[in-house]
Amino acid sequence: MDRLIMIRYGEIMLKGLNRSFFENKLVSNIKEALNGMENAKLDKKRGRIFIEPRDDSFDIEKAIKRLTKVFGIVSVSPVWRVNNDFEEIKNCAFNITKELLDKGIGTTFKVETKRGNKQFYMDTPEINRELGAYLLSQFPFLTVDVNNPSFTVNVEVREFTYLYTEVIHGFGGMPVGSNGKAMLLISGGIDSPVAGWMMAKRGLEIDAVHFYSYPYTSERSKEKVIDLMKVLSEYCHKTNLYVVPFTDIQLEIADKCPHDQMTIIMRRIMMKIAEKLAEKTGARALITGESLGQVASQTLQAIEVTNAAVKMPVFRPLIGMDKNEVIEIARKIQTFDISILPYEDCCTVFVAKHPETKPRLDRIIKSESKLDMDRLINEALEATEIININQNI
């Protein structure tokens, strides 16, 4: 018997002639996720991917933890591999069942078989019946419960037979990098990391830009964003964080523009800078954490005026979600506790007391004409710090 990890993927299976492209991208991302754990063989076979350790030093639990964060993977299972021989299948099922019973998992079970290899001499109902009967004969206190068993002995008959009891769910989606690249505008709040995570799940490679207002915001506020990006990198792999100094721009806006327009003008300049960074890095869209009506800069009119600042598509995956829905995802992906740390970002420091909620584009452009926009943007870009984030460091 050999110990392996079985990986299942879902949405990719629906692809047509370009399915191999998505499968190969998923394989590449799996290899990257297992960086530093190279003592294993990866094998792709008919809708499954198998990780086969080369020796006992391979940490299967650690590998599974990483694999469940690889987008495209629906679930993983630690499995036992045996030859397509019913005596070997019975012996393996006996060992699996005994180990579970020794742990006190319960006394009800069922056998569930998938017979992909139609050449195998027993059909699915026969395997279920005969294997179940064998386990009952070896463990008389067991009973069969097909609806709510304490555990299920799963059997997959393929080129070999694989037996397992655990199915550990991943997040599904599409492999990162299979649908291009985008630039995430990330603050230190709850929303933007979730937005980046959601778009990475749809196959986008993610870089991020953060606007930093030192000394009005502390060094800890920047470290907070770096920590958020480290969490995201567990799903997005290697990524770059662009830290843009924004203080001079905000001070000039405060000095030359109407106070109630400050927020929308700041947002438009952020979008312009993010677009220029995106163009340099090969990204073809921007991502924000905006939710319709949540704050003054996220009214329909404000979003319309903000969009007018750039030509790139702007993805807003949270646009129809309420805060509780976003928080639920943030907790699940483990960004929430970092996001609520009390270090202010540039938007909360330079916020208007009574921001305009229904801005008109012509009036905003007129106010912006008082700024030396090209100089402000170019100086900010020249002083931008680039931080490389690696998921396995």
Image (cartoon, grey):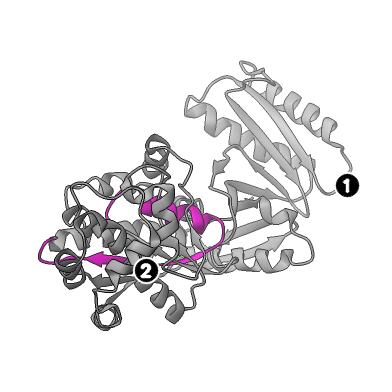
Query: Which sits in the foreground, 50 or 383?
Result: 383
Q: Is residue 274 magenta?
A: no
In this view, the residue in front, 113 or 255, is 255
| Amino acid type, callout 1 | Lys
Q: Which residue is mark 1?
A: 118
Question: Element type at marker 1?
Answer: loop
Q: Splitting the image into 4 quarters, where does residue 347 fall?
A: bottom left
User: Could you say which is closer to the camera, residue 231 or residue 152?
Assistant: 231
Q: Is residue 291 visible?
A: yes
Work out how far the residue at label 1 is from the one at label 2, CA to CA, in angstroms: 44 Å
Secondary-structure class at tag 2: loop
Query: Above or below — where is 315 with respect to 378?
Result: above
Mark 1 residue crowding within 10 angstroms, few (<14) / some (14–19) / many (20+): few
Q: Residue 72: where, in percent of width, then height? A: 59, 55
Residue 28 percent coordinates (x, y): 57, 69
How would you rate the neighbour count of disc 2 (Cα within 10 Å): few for under 14, some for 14-19, many for 20 or more?
some
Question: Taking 77 as reference, is 146 above or below it?
Answer: above
Q: Position of residue 291 (x, y in %)?
A: 41, 46
- From the viewer's perspective, is 241 left or right of 141? left
Q: Give the residue at mark 2.
A: 390
Disc on the earlier residue, 1 or 2: 1
Name the residue rendered at 14%, 60% in the picture: 217
Residue 20: numbered disc: none
Q: Which residues are magenta?
A: 187-216
With 73 as the anchor, is 145 left or right in this view? right
Q: Quadrant of residue 310?
A: bottom left
In which quadrant of the rendered image does the C terminus lie?
A: bottom left
Regarding residue 2, the answer to whether it shows in the image is no
**Tag 2: amino acid:** Asn
Q: Position of residue 66 (x, y in %)?
A: 46, 55
